[in-house]
């Protein structure tokens, strides 16, 4: 799931407020400030022009990420993970310009085929990225991994089913591998989450590094990814199909009881599924301030 750095709205011109659905794609709505006639009074200008402000929590998130993510092979310590979770737990959809009441996806049935996922990038550098994924109802981000990454996921809107796995070390199991393409994984999560809910965290080898999102209702999820995907640096995204431990790809049972089979699955790496393709949109929400001067200043 490679994502690119998104563009930035020109501050003071486009005041982002929300995302909307246009031609089956979600988009941030731009509110362009109309130029007033010279006859308009300054008072009127002051009433109409609202300069976007950075929500304090979004700026805190950015500043903390810059402190915490120190590049490849660096997993943040528990204290830093707690710090980021505390910030993300406070975040609301409004902090990135989304409205709770906004119906930004068409109703189910109005979209032909599998609904496509849309994403936008708030910020990206070599150490981390801040992205929002928009999933229409029934949309799926297929089972995929995050090699060498730590990922914080904050569900901002909607209800989502999340299934996630971690690899089982081959030395920790007596299972006979049914075929060379399969690898045993431990089920970490298989639950439904509704916003607002706590932030979930996955690590390179734990916390559900391989996961799948299925939107039960239209959803928006904010991901903090450190470090971002990078094919050049060996952090490409792989996709998987999962099979129950008791019912392998060849359909034969391998003598594992139902109880033993629960909580595990066999994963087979697959080609990039059609449903993995995403549309990218420009981020027009509140813009973070990158100047170090703002590291210790409350923005609001
Ligand atoms: Fe993911």
Image (tube, rainbow, N blue to C red):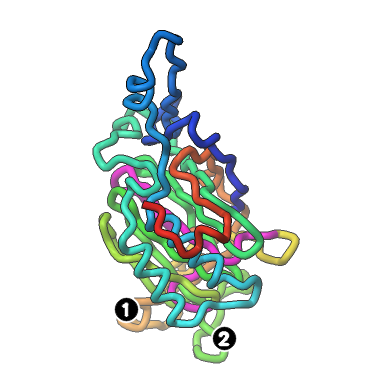
Residue 124 shown in magenta: no
Q: Distance between the residues labelled 2 and 1?
A: 21 Å
Disc 2 and disc 1 in contact, CB within 8 angstroms: no
Residue situated in front as seen by the camera: 204 or 283 = 283
Q: Callout 2: 10 Å neighbours few (<14), some, many (20+)?
A: few
Could you say where residue 236 lies in the image, as x and y percent from the top left? 66, 61
Asked if the beta carbon under badge 2 is closer than 8 A to the nearest atom of ligand 1, the reply is: no
Q: Identify the magenta region.
A: 205-230
Q: Callout 1: 10 Å neighbours few (<14), some, many (20+)?
A: few
Residue under the point 26% across and 42% down: 100
* Residue 210 seen in the figure: no
Residue situated in front as seen by the camera: 261 or 234 = 234
- 2 or 1: tag closer to the N-terminus: 2
Residue 215 shown in magenta: yes
Residue situated in front as seen by the camera: 224 or 297 = 297
Judged left or right of residue 164, residue 262 is left
Query: What residue is pinned by disc 1?
Result: 258
Residue situated in front as seen by the camera: 59 or 281 = 59
Query: What residue is pinned by disc 2?
Result: 170
Residue 237's place in the image compared with 32, above or below, is below
- Residue 293, image quadrant: bottom right
Mark toward the viewer: 2 or 1: 2
Judged left or right of residue 169, residue 197 is left
* Residue occupying the far right of the picture: 232
Could you say where residue 125 lies in the image, as x and y percent from the top left? 63, 57
Q: What element carries label 2?
A: helix
């Amino acid at each position: 799931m490679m994502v690119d750095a998104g563009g930035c709205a020109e501050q003071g011109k486009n005041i982002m407020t929300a995302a909307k659905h246009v031609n089956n794609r979600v988009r941030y709505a731009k509110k362009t400030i109309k130029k007033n006639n010279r006859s308009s009074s300054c008072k009127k200008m002051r009433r109409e022009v609202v300069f976007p402000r950075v929500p304090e929590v979004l700026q805190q998130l950015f500043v903390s990420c810059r402190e915490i993510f120190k590049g490849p092979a660096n997993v943040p310590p528990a204290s830093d993970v707690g710090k980021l979770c505390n910030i993300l737990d406070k975040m609301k959809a409004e902090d990135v310009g989304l409205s709770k009441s906004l119906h930004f996806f068409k109703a189910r049935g109005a979209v032909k085929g599998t609904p496509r996922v849309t994403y936008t990038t708030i910020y990206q550098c070599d150490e981390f990225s801040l992205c929002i994924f928009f999933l229409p109802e029934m949309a799926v981000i297929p089972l995929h991994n995050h090699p060498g990454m730590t990922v914080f996921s904050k569900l901002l809107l909607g209800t989502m089913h999340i299934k996630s796995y971690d690899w089982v070390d081959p030395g920790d199991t007596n299972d006979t591998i049914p075929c060379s393409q399969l690898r045993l994984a431990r089920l970490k999560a298989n639950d439904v989450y509704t916003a607002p809910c706590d932030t979930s965290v996955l690590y390179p080898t734990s916390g559900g590094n391989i996961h799948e999102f299925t939107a039960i209702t239209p959803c928006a999820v904010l991901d903090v990814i450190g470090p971002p995907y990078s094919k050049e640096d060996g952090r490409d995204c792989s996709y998987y199909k999962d099979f129950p431990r008791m019912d392998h790809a060849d359909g034969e049972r391998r003598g594992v009881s139902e109880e033993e089979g629960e909580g595990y699955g066999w994963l087979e790496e697959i080609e990039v599924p059609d449903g993995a393709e995403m549309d990218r949109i420009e981020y027009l929400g509140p813009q973070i301030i990158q100047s170090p001067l703002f590291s210790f200043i409350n923005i609001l």
